[in-house]
Image (cartoon, coloured by chain):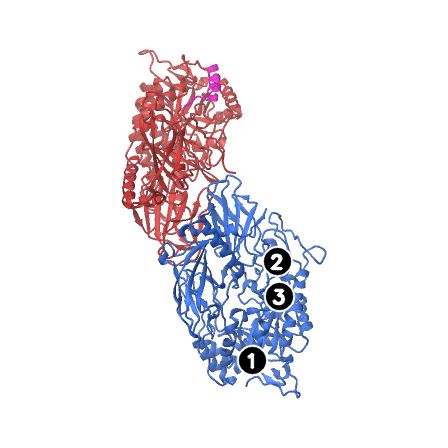
Chain colours: A blue, B red
Amino acid sequence: QATREPHEGTQERSFSIDYDNNQFLKDGEPFRYVSGSIHYFRTLPSEWRDRLKKMRMAGFNALETYVEWSSHEPEQGTYDFSGINDLPSFLTIAQEEDLVVILRLGPFADAERDMGGLPTGCSQEPRLRLGARPCECTRVRGQGGGCQCWWWWLVSVLVVGWCHAGGGGCVSAGAYLKYVDAWFGDALLPKVKPLLYENGGPVIMMQVANEYGSYPDCDFAYTSHLRDLVRAGVGEGTVLFTTDGNGVGFLKCGKIPEVYATVDFGSGTDVAKSFDTMRLFEPRGPLVNSEYYPGWLDHWGAPHSTVKAEAVAKTLDEMLALNASVNMYMFHGGTSFGFTAGSNMNGAFQACPTSYDYDAPLSEAGDPTDKYWIVRNVTAKYLPLPPGKVPPASPKHGYGKVSLAPLGSVFHMLETVQKVTSKWPLTFEALLVPNGLVVYQTVLPFRIADPARLTLNDLHDRGYVFVDAEFAGMVSREQDMYDLAISARPNQTLTIVVESQGRICFGPHINDFKGITANVSLSGHILENWTMAPLPLTNAKRLDRALTRLRRWAASMHLPPHRLQGTDKGGMTFFTGHFQIPTNSSHPMDTFLRLDGWSKGLAWVNNFCLGRYWPEVGPQVTLYVPRGVLQPGNNTLVLLEQEAAPCLTPDSCYVTLQDTHVIDGPTPL
Amino acid sequence: QATREPHEGTQERSFSIDYDNNQFLKDGEPFRYVSGSIHYFRTLPSEWRDRLKKMRMAGFNALETYVEWSSHEPEQGTYDFSGINDLPSFLTIAQEEDLVVILRLGPFADAERDMGGLPTGCSQEPRLRLGARPCECTRVRGQGGGCQCWWWWLVSVLVVGWCHAGGGGCVSAGAYLKYVDAWFGDALLPKVKPLLYENGGPVIMMQVANEYGSYPDCDFAYTSHLRDLVRAGVGEGTVLFTTDGNGVGFLKCGKIPEVYATVDFGSGTDVAKSFDTMRLFEPRGPLVNSEYYPGWLDHWGAPHSTVKAEAVAKTLDEMLALNASVNMYMFHGGTSFGFTAGSNMNGAFQACPTSYDYDAPLSEAGDPTDKYWIVRNVTAKYLPLPPGKVPPASPKHGYGKVSLAPLGSVFHMLETVQKVTSKWPLTFEALLVPNGLVVYQTVLPFRIADPARLTLNDLHDRGYVFVDAEFAGMVSREQDMYDLAISARPNQTLTIVVESQGRICFGPHINDFKGITANVSLSGHILENWTMAPLPLTNAKRLDRALTRLRRWAASMHLPPHRLQGTDKGGMTFFTGHFQIPTNSSHPMDTFLRLDGWSKGLAWVNNFCLGRYWPEVGPQVTLYVPRGVLQPGNNTLVLLEQEAAPCLTPDSCYVTLQDTHVIDGPTPL
């Protein structure tokens, strides 16, 4: 049955755990949820209601979402709850669509997001001093100047990771916790509190930390601090829970006293055994799978992940038959727009693509898939389906070819952007650059072997090396290749364009500084005196202004079109073009950007960053262009192509807007 | 005193060792020599007499030279004693200039020559089968099919080196010795025999093997075989000797029974101690230093080697005061024209420059240096100086700027040269290419990671990698860098232009196959189906024809000048230009080619290959252009620039012919 409003005056709104009967109680009545994950930060606000409604129409009675700290605190102490970050509106719409809410507070999320949703702000203050060795903590607050850290894990990650990165600088545990305390206490919890179920809102449960048992640190002082922080902010009326893998080892450290422990696992898993493990830590109370996977995440260059709908349905049925509450992660994955996709480090560094389709019941563009219907049939066995019809897939349209022309190169843009100079190369974080490209340059002061061994010990993540604007080779974290043989003469300029490919979202390498993170040497001689030019790619307004300046600069130089490209192949070049959308009311519609012949880069439509494209390695071939970023009449497309464009002739210099999405394209051997 | 002719009829010409009196006997009279090394293969025949006369005028009474097997047997079984290989003429001129001769037969020489003067022919027959692993001997003759080798060292080098190189193929010891036997027995010794002192010629002594004691193999069967081979060819009337370092360890294995053992060492060495070591192996007989170093060899990228003249004079004086015979290595170093310079492997691979000046008494261009006069003063204390004046330095002239223009690129040349296809890449030796550049190409059959790791396990020596004619990076044996991150798509062509930088001339790596010597893989996937295009650089006539075809092809394509270059920077491009020489009798004069702004390549004047240039790494900055290759009137210069030419504008596209030689230019850190 649907969530019932309590009789006013007769019974307060309440949500609790009924340990005696192994169930939840909502307003005093037995309750179990079938929930689905939809991340507000992965769908345009204009589509939130559509996606939530479709989930509700599959019989699901709850929404689960992470809170993404980094999106809400883009600069330390400045909080953003507007637009796609308007969490209260998202939760309110959920409530309007008859869904209760399970909120995963964090502070850490994972979710295949840049740095797992942790802000990079805490890493920004101390400047890396790359020349200093051995590792030296330049900025230690708290316990007497050492790197004594009571939240051992995060600090070990932050400090050790940082120090390993090549020099000094560490954030003390005290500084980090102050940061968390402010975020929870001053910003997040006050926003959430009115949305709690007891206060008339939809939020029945809140997760503290996230899969913390996957880390070896087992610091109960830290997790208890988080629990107390939440309790202090919202009171005692909400069920708090943790989520961990379905193994004793995970739960042992993930479980927080007085916080309900739940497990996560996917289809084909032994359900009874998994819940037996949960029972070791929660002998009584409702069975809960907090992340039941209907699909799986993707990585660039690896085949698209899929899970058969029948297998998903079967295990779901098994769990629901046990009266378990289940959250399907994801019910609708959506899109990691802009620079928000994260990376994993599984032996090798693997970046996540822009699409977060996840092979979920609702596709990336929000359309019900076969899996939607099959899952809905299972849900319907246990919960009433709401009346009415499932909303249809939103219409798609192919707007056709969009001709593009070069606007100017990354190197040209250097003429018009602010630069930073430093003896040692600075990380993106030290440069206050959230993501994108930073151009590092130094002039060779000495005569060097030919070729010389350029050693970029720990560059994150992808470096394009040029000698006096001539391409000289690449370094790549994905390939674990940081050495390069280059030919260069004294007084030539060494340019390294560094791309961040998404910070690691999970595991010990999560404190993932970007850019040049260690000394650069040439045949053993450390290079000094760097000029760094961050490109304003993450801020639409600043990018727009920079492109205007670039256009003016290029016009003033009277460069022929081919000279507007950064390389002969069209790499390191901004391209732009326009396309028209009919002004009748059925438009704009969702569409998909196909980039055949293009290599690797970023795409913007009307100043909205669609995200990274990389069709050559797949599996994602097209980029989702939601109708919400389109407008009737003239629309502007901008690409930043890093490697090669099909633009040797103007005729071949185009992309296509088509009506079908391709996210399972061929991938490398 | 000068070499005296014996009284005809009264005493036979004879040369022997007087063990009783620790001296040589020439025609029955006590004799000691002060000899100097001049290699006929490093000076134009037109200059031989000049250089020998100048040495004689320093009081030296003997000439020493290696015989370079590889020059005399460019193809197996075809012997060449013409032109610069006309050893009999060189020795006859020495005799005419009143010098006796000490001939170092080999078969191995070292001398900083390509493969130490060993022909690469013995390595040519068996094709490398790079796909076959583990190492498999594809062609074993002799002892029953195994790689049983009684000359253990050379075979270990040939076989193990070869097999290590990536696949099968080995030359049996039997095959090698047959090859040596033919060279000595059929070609060299019959040429030398009439030139022996006893037969009226200048040759008083002959060296068997060369510093063999520096190798750990100690195979007396091999060295005795060489001794017997020489004796069988020339009889018993000539003194045979060996040369080894001045340590017991060297002499222990270098000494051959019935062959006189001598030592070598440079200035500043403890002379008495060195000769004491010699005395352990030759208790009686004359003291001999067979290689007394007035300077030292150079390597590209390392500072020019010099030894102070005073130090050279002092130790020389000490040795002569002991009545020792001494050979100065080199008295005149000359030039490693063309592709004849070798390399060393001292931890790292180090190639020798074109100049073999050696800081010797006579400069590379044959001019007496200060060291000449200081050494002459020492010699004069012990041997009579011949009457007359020392010939002056030959006049030099700066012919000025030579404007150059691109003729076409290495890639264009591929259109007009013969190619070889093979499943696996073939070495230069298998392709019958002595030296130069081979262009290896394969089409990528699969989609591969971006970037992919291109692994060129053991490429010799320098590889320029292109993807569809776009430069993608370098690999370098000097830097021990064989991996490269490249971005490439299916059906793109991977091109690797491989340069041989001179085969190793000494030590265990001497069997130095050139080219791609091991499987090439891309992210672990072995690349097959190669096309190889050897460029005809070592044969002047074939190169001239190829350049004519290239010129015709370029004209037919109507390419603008900048399209005639292989890369934007002017790399991989043939350039040509002309210069005029006055027709009056004082010209042509020696001159020096200066290549400011050029990077690395080869230079030809009137189809004569001057050798490799590489001014960016030094120490050699100019190339010696002997007057013998010049002609009154029009002269043609051709450059093959591998990396970068100063030819962005025609005005800056030139070289200079100047009147001074620079071989001590700046070198890298």
Mark 3 closeness class: few <14, some 14–19, many ≥20 residues within 10 Å: some
**What element does badge 1 sit on?**
helix
Question: What percent of the width, then of the height, locates residue A361?
Answer: 47, 75
**What element does badge 2 sit on?**
helix
For residue B56, side relative to residue A448 (left or right): left
Indicate which label's residue lies in the foreground, 3 or 2: 3
Task: Tell me the magenta residue range.
Answer: B366-381
Q: Quadrant of the C terminus of chain A?
A: bottom left
Circles 3 and 1 on the same chain: yes
Mark 1 closeness class: few <14, some 14–19, many ≥20 residues within 10 Å: some
Magenta-drawn stretch contains B375: yes
Picture layout, residue B135 above or below residue B192: below
For label 2, the residue is A123
For label 1, the residue is A96
Question: What percent of the width, then of the height, locates residue B78?
Answer: 28, 34
Q: Nearer the viewer, residue A549 or B21?
A: A549
Q: Nearer the viewer, residue A55 or A482?
A: A55
Which sits earlier in the primary sequence, circle 3 or circle 1? Answer: 3
For residue A527, side relative to residue A625 (left or right): right
For label 3, the residue is A79
Question: Which chain does the residue under circle 3 lie in?
Answer: A
Question: What percent of the width, then of the height, locates residue B540?
Answer: 30, 35
Q: At label 1, which amino acid type do we have?
A: Glu
Q: At label 3, which amino acid type do we have?
A: Tyr
Query: Which quadrant of the figure has residue A104?
Result: bottom right
